[in-house]
């Protein structure tokens, strides 16, 4: 890990208070604790110069969602 970087990030599936699922961008500190998240399921990526870049990002999101499908994050626990 680069000593100049204090966090890592990735995509995770969250479940909200209504039991609905969404994809979120999640930031972790050096210990792996979630320190921040961004709701992206209402604002899918846009603004790419090349369709290949968009497809690469969508594939990253899908791969991450598949990887963590059995470790869904309950958003109500993070808001406590």
Image: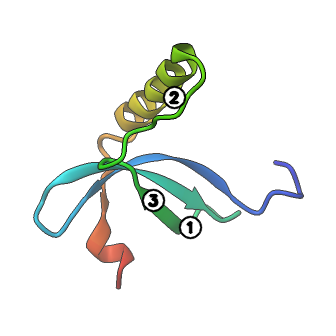
Pinpoint residue 37: horizontal percent, then vertical percent. Answer: 47, 62
Q: Residue furthest bottom?
A: 80
In the image, taking residue 40 as reference, residue 36 lies left or right, namely right
Determine the residue positioned at 38% across, 74% down: 78
- CA distance separating discs 1 and 3: 15 Å
Report the residue that reaches farthest toward the top: 52
Q: In the picture shown, does residue 43 fall above or below 66?
A: below
Q: Is residue 21 left or right of residue 77?
A: left
Q: Which mark is residue 57?
A: 2
Q: Please report whichever mark, 1 or 3, sits nearer to the chain's N-terminal start.
A: 1
Left or right: 52 as drawn, with respect to 66: right
Q: Quadrant of residue 15?
A: bottom left
The image's mark for residue 64 is none
- Say which element carries label 3: strand
Label whose residue precedes the other's in the sequence (2 or 3):
3
Residue linked to disc 1: 33
| Residue to which mark 3 is pinned | 38
Q: Looking at the image, which residue is at 57% across and 59% down?
A: 27
Helix, strand or loop at label 1? It is: loop
Please provide percent x and percent y for residue 38.
45, 59
- Label 2 crowding class (10 Å Cα cut-off): few <14, some 14-19, many 20+? few
| Nearer the observer, 4 or 69 | 4
* Left or right: 58, with 21 as reference point: right
- For label 1, the crowd category at 10 Å Cα-Cα, with few meaning under 14, some 14 to 19 and many 20 or more, is few
Q: Residue at x 58, y 17 (%)?
A: 50
Q: Total number of numbered labels?
A: 3
Where, quadrant-wise, is the C terminus in this rendering?
A: bottom left
Q: Residue furthest right?
A: 3
């Amino acid at each position: 890990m680069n000593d100049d970087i204090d966090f890592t990030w990735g995509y995770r599936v969250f479940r909200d208070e209504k039991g609905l699922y969404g994809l979120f961008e999640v930031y972790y500190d050096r210990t792996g604790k979630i320190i921040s998240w961004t709701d992206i399921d209402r604002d899918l990526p846009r603004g790419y110069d090349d369709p290949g870049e968009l497809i690469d990002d969508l594939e990253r999101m899908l791969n991450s969602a598949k990887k963590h499908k059995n470790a869904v994050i309950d958003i109500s626990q993070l808001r406590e």
